[in-house]
Image (cartoon, rainbow, N blue to C red):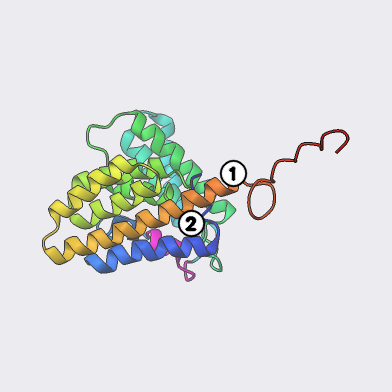
């Protein structure tokens, strides 16, 4: 995982970036559950008001039915996509921390498996609504599979083709360390912007995402390279003094 976003402060930073994208551009951003048949969104996952608890009876009935469909026909792409979506909906969230619970993470992993099977069937027109769900499940507050989240959000962007969604794709791609996709998405967002003001807003929001991604990468490198105290690796041991000194 690129970032340890279980730390509440870091989650709040990422939340602010995406919330800034939504407010600045006034867009229906997919990670906020807007613009498709998506219940909930990334912001809902952060919300301390999210409802926790066991899988609802209604969702469980739907899960049972779609799992039966998949068992009867493993090549049923529509059923696999629906299974991925329902597993995400069944994921529980801790009301105090706003993070997915252990049960919730388990549901997300099952959602990921269904999505992987769905993509392996190479559907000619991947379902953008399911892809929007998977961008959340695989994203920074979910499983942290950021490159997979980028791929899912690309499916959504190609269908919606709006400045806000491409701006969000750019921000997510930079977080994933995929600068090429980030640059291309940013260019597309700027091309699709309907005013100079929106172009400036897009640039500001993406720059904030880039800065956060760079900071997180630096922190990770320091954690991996450190080990000799708070300041980093321990200094080398000096050579022994020459005899007779």
**Magenta span has 164?**
no
Q: Where residue 162 sits: x, y (%)?
A: 18, 54
Instruction: Give the side of residue 21 with respect to residue 64, left or right.
Output: left
Magenta-highlighted residues: 41-50
Identity of the residue furthest to the front in this view: 244
Instruction: State the residue in front, 207 or 191.
Output: 207
Q: Callout 1: helix, strand or loop?
A: helix
Q: Where residue 149 sits: x, y (%)?
A: 38, 45
Instruction: State the residue in front, 141 or 114.
Output: 141
Rendered residue at 46%/65% (across/down): 12
Rendered residue at 47%/53% (across/down): 216
Instruction: Give the side of residue 207 with respect to residue 52, left or right.
Output: left
Instruction: Give the side of residue 82 with respect to residue 186, left or right.
Output: right
Identity of the residue furthest to the bottom in this view: 49
Instruction: State the residue in front, 82 or 199.
Output: 199
Residue that carries the numbered disc 1 in the rendered image: 224
Q: Which of marks 1 and 2 is nearer the N terminus?
A: 2
Local packing at callout 1 (Cα closer than 10 Å; few below 14, some 14-19, many 20+) is few
Q: Marks 1 and 2, Cα distance to the nearest angstrom?
A: 45 Å
Instruction: State the residue in front, 57 or 115.
Output: 115
Which is closer to the viewer, label 1 or label 2? 1
Identity of the residue furthest to the right in this view: 244
Residue that carries the numbered disc 2 in the rendered image: 57
Quarter-wise, where is residue 239 in the image? Answer: top right
């Amino acid at each position: 995982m690129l970032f340890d976003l279980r730390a509440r402060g870091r989650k709040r930073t990422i939340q602010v970036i995406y919330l800034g994208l939504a407010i600045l551009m006034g867009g229906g951003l997919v990670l906020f559950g807007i613009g498709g048949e998506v219940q909930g969104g990334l912001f809902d996952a952060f919300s301390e008001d999210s409802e926790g608890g066991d899988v609802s009876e209604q969702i469980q009935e739907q899960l049972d039915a779609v799992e039966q469909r998949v068992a009867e026909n493993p090549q049923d792409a529509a059923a696999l996509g629906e299974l991925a979506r329902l597993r995400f909906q069944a994921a529980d969230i801790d009301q105090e921390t706003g993070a997915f619970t252990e049960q919730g993470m388990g549901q997300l992993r099952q959602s990921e498996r269904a999505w992987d099977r769905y993509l392996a069937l190479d559907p000619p027109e991947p379902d953008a609504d399911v892809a929007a769900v998977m961008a959340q499940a695989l994203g920074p507050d979910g499983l942290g599979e950021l490159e997979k989240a980028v791929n899912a959000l690309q499916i959504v962007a190609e269908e919606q083709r709006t400045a806000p969604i491409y701006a969000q794709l750019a921000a997510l791609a930079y977080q994933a360390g995929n600068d090429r996709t980030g640059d291309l998405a940013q260019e597309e967002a700027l091309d699709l912007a309907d005013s100079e003001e929106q172009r400036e807003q897009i640039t500001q929001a993406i720059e904030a995402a880039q800065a956060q991604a760079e900071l997180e990468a630096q922190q990770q490198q320091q954690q991996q390279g450190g080990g000799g105290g708070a300041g980093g690796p321990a200094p080398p041991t000096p050579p022994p003094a020459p005899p007779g000194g």
